[in-house]
Amino acid sequence: MKTEIDFVLLGPSGFLGSAILRYLESSEFSVHATRIRLKDRLGLEALLDEIRPKLGVICAAGERGRPNITWCDSHPVETVDANITGQLSVAAACYERGLHVILLGTGALYVSSDRKRKFSESDPPNGGSPGVYTALRQKMEELTALFDNTLVVRVLYPLSSDLDARGLLGKLARFQQVDSVETSVTVLDDLLPLLPVLAQRRAAGVFNFVNPGTVSYPEIVSLLSERISPCAEWTPPQIRGLLCNVRA
């Protein structure tokens, strides 16, 4: 008898994808992870028809820049191909089969001020003139709103309990200087268990996938300094500039 699979996971090798994969493999949910390319519509459709996931698809694949999102400014076509064409293709393939799909988006859409410090999913982005990466993520949200099977979770400065160099903790630990930024963050250890719940409820639209409250980079560096052994060869990064706010 064929074993029933709960999720198909696209993009399992990136920071977010690998964290999702580890969580699902350690939970009661079964997962089929694949590195199939988003532009391979026929291959994706064949895979979905073969696996027929019970709860749906989680897409952690996409273009996040190399080494960071500023890369997208000079490579707009490649970014469109991955973050618009590719992810819409996933949403459409799932829609045709009655499957729920979760797409990973960005929460870097808002800048807080003295007049407004908290933002909900219904608030329009106020971040000024966004770069290519953020502008296309906004466009993706507008387009996926047409699909009743699609949920975009807005991830912001994701971090995990390890020091993976691709997460916020790992990045700050390796920098020589960091800015005085206060922001919402996505603590993966806290929030990844929500993904199966959202899929079971077939939640659609957008969801600010961040923890309550905010944290500042200086606070994180201070906590790292307290927890890292004095014997470790690590020099905390210097803090520069006045405190600024980026929130979801």
Image (cartoon, helix red, strand yellow):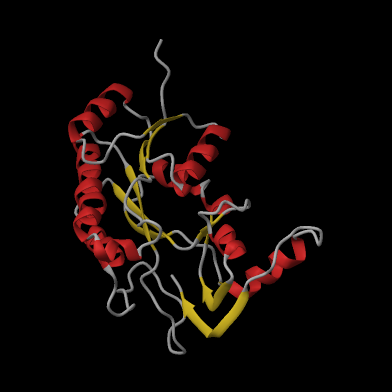
Q: In the image, 176: left or right of 43?
A: right
Vertically, is 15 above or below 175? above
Expressed as whole percent of the image width and height from the top left, the position of residue 38 reads: 26, 41
Quadrant in which the C terminus is drawn? bottom left
Q: Residue furthest bottom?
A: 114
Q: Residue furthest top?
A: 1
Residue 138 seen in the figure: no
Front position in the image: 4 or 18: 18
Location of residue 168 (image quadrant): bottom right
Front position in the image: 23 or 16: 16
Vertically, is 145 above or below 193? below
Q: In the image, 95: left or right of 66?
A: left
Expressed as whole percent of the image width and height from the top left, the position of residue 39 reads: 21, 40
Front position in the image: 66 or 11: 66
Quadrant in which the N terminus is drawn? top left
Location of residue 159 (image quadrant): bottom right
Q: In the image, 218: left or right of 95?
A: right
Q: Residue at x 45, y 63 (%)?
A: 156
Q: Residue at x 28, y 27 (%)?
A: 47
Q: Residue at x 64, y 68 (%)?
A: 220
Expressed as whole percent of the image width and height from the top left, the position of residue 175 reads: 57, 66
Vertically, is 225 above or below 218? above
Expressed as whole percent of the image width and height from the top left, the position of residue 162 reads: 63, 51
Q: Residue at x 70, y 62 (%)?
A: 234
Q: Residue furthest right?
A: 231
Count the marks: how many?
0
Vertically, is 214 above or below 163? below
